Image (spheres, rainbow, N blue to C red):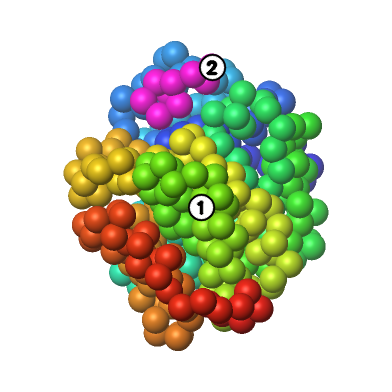
Amino acid sequence: MTPEQQSVAVLGGGAWGTALAQMLASDGRDVTMWVLEADVVEDINANHRNARFLPDAQLAPTIRATGLLDEVAGAQVVLAVVPAQHLGSVLAQMPGFSGDLVICAKGIEQATGAIMSDVAAKACPRATLAALSGPTFAHEVAAGLPAAVTLACGGGEDQWERLSPVIARPAFRPYYSDDLIGAEIGGAVKNVLAIACGVVDGLALGQNARNALIARGFAEMVRFGEALGAERATLTGLCGLGDLVLTCSSTSSRNFSLGKAIGEGQSARDLMENRDTVAEGAHTAPVLQKLAHEKAIDMPIVDAVVALLDGAPAQDVVTDLLARPLTTERRPA
């Protein structure tokens, strides 16, 4: 079967799921989207828009939305773009899926501490898993602006040869990896660190402070990733450092925006309750902290984010970070 003949579906009708569907349909391919919200299904099918989650994008007419999982479960390639905390419950409704399942959710399951590939493997044991991750904002991908991502293939080079022609577009360039764990950890940890960088921006602490936080946060990402079996080269690539720098530098990031609002004095609880979109880092932070403590991995920035989400004053949390003992960059700190 040629790449053009493979049927493709997207699970999730949020901004990122919609952007990926638009990217896949940019060459005229038929793409089916499973969408939870009935109003979004109607908007996509009737108006070729998703005014609720990606209002500025004009969608290709070859994108069709449905609220029925059965209508996407038969596709050869499925991109799973539902929020991380709901991935398992959605995939559990299609346990017989046996095609290529590309995980695009970034996070760690709170209830189990499992990364997304473990969640997916349990729900869809016959699927061949991959992960797509990298420095991408949905509105830019939907507009056809250039982007590069990591496509980590659990099925190795055979899966890459099968998937890369389906996913690659002139302005959307995937790079191969066989390090599924590294790709997922990079995406999960950077969301937590982006909240911290948003707080720094909200407190008006300056560019020096934010970039120091990015560098020291990256050290935490590498420590955690290597402890779980990730390759350092993966974490220094697009899905680790690349995604971290982008997400920690712009209010286009939901996690950065959440942190910025906390830094400006708003309540984390109120912000989470009143958001229509998901800031995955807020859900990942507590379980990431728990796993780090269990494995004796020092992650002070992650600890700080958890304290902020629990309501600690932002200035006090920053003061505590700055008061940590002096040490060297060449060992965990």
> Does residue 278 appear in this view?
no
- Mark 2 highlights which residue? 58
x, y percent for residue 124: 48, 63
| Alpha carbon distance from label 1 to label 2 | 38 Å
Please determine whether, in this image, residue 142 is positioned above or below residue 312.
above
Please determine whether, in this image, residue 111 is positioned above or below residue 169.
below
x, y percent for residue 179: 68, 68
Tag nearer the camera, 1 or 2 = 1
- Mark 1 highlights which residue? 209
Q: Nearer the viewer, residue 196 or 104?
A: 196
> Does residue 182 appear in this view?
yes
Residue 214 quadrant: bottom right
x, y percent for residue 116: 48, 63
Density class for disc 1 (Cα within 10 Å; few <14, some 14-19, many ≥20) is few
Density class for disc 2 (Cα within 10 Å; few <14, some 14-19, many ≥20) is some
Query: What's the mark number on residue 224?
Result: none
What kind of element bears circle 2? loop
Residue 222 quadrant: bottom right
Q: Mark 1 or mark 2: which comes first in sequence?
A: 2
Magenta-tinted stretch: 50-58
